[in-house]
Amino acid sequence: MQDPIIRINGVGKTYEGGFEALRRVDLEIRRGEIFALLGPNGAGKTTLISVICGLVSPSSGDIRVAGHDTITQYRAARKLIGLVPQELTSEAFETVWNTVSFSRGLFGRPPSPAHIEKVLRALSLWDKRNNRLMTLSGGMKRRVLIAKALSHEPRVLFLDEPTAGVDVALRREMWGVVRRLREDGVTIILTTHYIEEAEEMADRIGVINHGEVVLVEEKTALIQKLGRKQLTLQLHTPLSRVPDALAPFDLTLADDGATLKYTYDAAAREEGEHGIAALLSALKTAGIRVKDLNTRQSSLEDIFVDLIEERA
Ligand SMILES: Nc1ncnc2c1ncn2[C@@H]1O[C@H](COP(=O)(O)OP(=O)(O)OP(=O)(O)O)[C@@H](O)[C@H]1O
């Protein structure tokens, strides 16, 4: 495997007052991936991002960004990182161009109008470059946040809940922006409360709960591995109970007597003893006629809720 762009090694954080927000986190972020960090409120997502960005010092462990230690080589590490916070701070009277150019200067980079132009064009902000921030729509302000974070040409971009509180159209637009950045080779780490966002965007997913990374997995593998499938059968004639012959399938009969549900591991072979083909044939033998059927794959949301509840 390629060298990871971020290597987090045994990182813990205990805040003053004794609250342990992170417990021995080990995590590697791959170059060029979109990594979604999921977790309930207070799980430690912002703390982890802040530690990686050098805004909060870890109580234990160490972090390397492209080989640079975030404490002993802070400037070199920080230069490679862009951080998109949730909200714009008060620069209402500044123009888009000045705000973004100024951000670049903060990282000690020499002025580069060509780079600022490229960023503004990529984010569809070029026409607005001379507008004051206060005159922009919510969606444009979000894009300015990203432009600022990209002004110094980082290789890793952190997005802290990039679409919190925005409408569906804008959320989709933001997803498009993030995907294009990835195509440019930027590694993206985003935190989100929206499972749909992780499901849509991420290559890999990390789940953090009570300061611990409880799971890291490729998104597709995660859905396949932990996902369950549910087969719903609409029966021709309602049943009063599930016939004994079907007991091995562990079916549930809805109150109307006409809906049977069968839940099974998505990873399990469907042809097995308890597979769908076996079930359909057993139904036939039992003389139960099926009017309609459909299957549903459990979503990442189902998986996530199960995981968090398990560990609560
Ligand atoms: N400066 C601080 N001092 C003491 N405790 C803190 C401090 N900052 C955060 N915490 C606590 O650490 C825990 C983790 O907070 P953090 O902000 O990292 O969670 P989060 O996963 O980002 O949550 P959310 O989804 O609500 O933003 C919380 O219980 C929080 O109250």
Image (tube, rainbow, N blue to C red):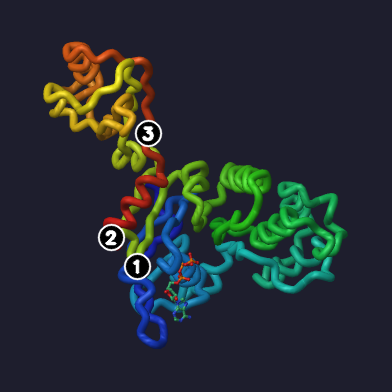
Residue shown at the point (51%, 44%) measured from the top left: 201
Q: 94 or 254: nearer the eye?
A: 254
Residue shown at the point (51%, 41%) measured from the top left: 200
Would you place residue 78 above or below residue 232 in this image? Answer: below
Kindly state the secondary structure of the residue where label 1 is placed.
loop
**Does residue 98 appear left or right of residue 210 in this picture?**
right
Question: Marks 2 and 1, Cα distance to the nearest angstrom?
Answer: 9 Å
| Disc nearer the start of the sequence (2/1) | 1
What amino acid does circle 1 point to?
His
Q: Residue 35's x, y, as percent?
A: 46, 51
Q: Which residue is mark 2?
A: 311
**Does residue 158 appear left or right of residue 214 in this picture?**
right
Q: Residue 218's x, y, as percent?
A: 38, 44
What amino acid does circle 3 point to?
Gln
Q: Which residue is mark 3?
A: 297
Residue shown at the point (43%, 51%) measured from the top left: 30
What amino acid does circle 2 point to?
Arg
| Disc nearer the start of the sequence (3/1) | 1
